[in-house]
Image (tube, rainbow, N blue to C red):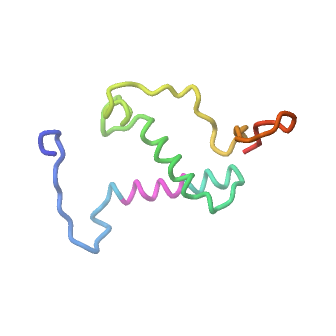
């Protein structure tokens, strides 16, 4: 890890105040989850899906940590195609297996 520039910093246990950046990031993630669920009107039980979406978005947007790049581009060396990304909470059509000829092969999701 040292060869890649990772620096070890030790903290005292049971003192989350010393985890400044991580605590701030976690707080921001929770706020984003609440905002997504509130704006979309979806059930609170979908908080895990919202958390995955927030983490995905954070990995694909610019950050100061890797100046001028997204974390994804810094890790994989290529830019991700975002043209097919859907808005969170937007209704979509999901293909179902075993649909009959006249009943259709999709459902609203």
Q: Is residue 29 magenta?
A: yes
Would residue 10 be found to the left or right of residue 36 on screen?
A: left
Q: Is residue 47 above or below residue 55?
A: below
Quarter of the figure that contains the C terminus? top right
Which is nearer the eye, 17 or 58?
A: 58
Range covered by the magenta-colored residues? 23-32
Residue lying furthest left in this view? 3
Question: Residue at the spot x=87%, y=35% of the render?
Answer: 102
Residue lying furthest right in this view? 102
Question: Residue at the spot x=68%, y=50% of the render?
Answer: 39
Which is nearer the eye, 104 or 101?
A: 101
Q: Is residue 45 above or below residue 25?
A: below
What is the x, y in percent for residue 93?
73, 37
Residue 46 found in image quarter: bottom right
Which is nearer the eye, 105 or 39?
A: 105
Q: Is residue 54 above or below residue 24?
A: above
What is the x, y in percent for residue 64?
34, 38
Question: Residue at the spot x=42%, y=40% of the render?
Answer: 59
Question: Residue at the spot x=32%, y=59% of the render?
Answer: 20
Q: Is residue 68 magenta?
A: no
Would residue 45 be found to the left or right of residue 61 on screen?
A: right
Quarter of the figure that contains the N terminus? top left
What is the x, y in percent for residue 17?
31, 67
Residue lying furthest bottom in this view? 14
């Amino acid at each position: 890890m040292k060869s890649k520039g990772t620096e070890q910093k030790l903290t005292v246990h049971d003192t989350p105040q010393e985890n400044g950046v991580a605590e701030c990031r976690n707080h921001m993630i929770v706020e984003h989850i609440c905002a997504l669920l509130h704006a979309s009107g979806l059930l609170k039980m979908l908080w895990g899906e919202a958390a995955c979406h927030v983490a995905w978005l954070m990995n694909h947007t610019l950050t100061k940590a890797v100046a001028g790049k997204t974390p994804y581009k810094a890790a994989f060396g290529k830019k991700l195609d975002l043209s097919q990304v859907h808005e969170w909470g937007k209704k979509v059509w999901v293909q179902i297996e075993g649909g009959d000829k006249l009943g259709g092969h999709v459902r609203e999701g």
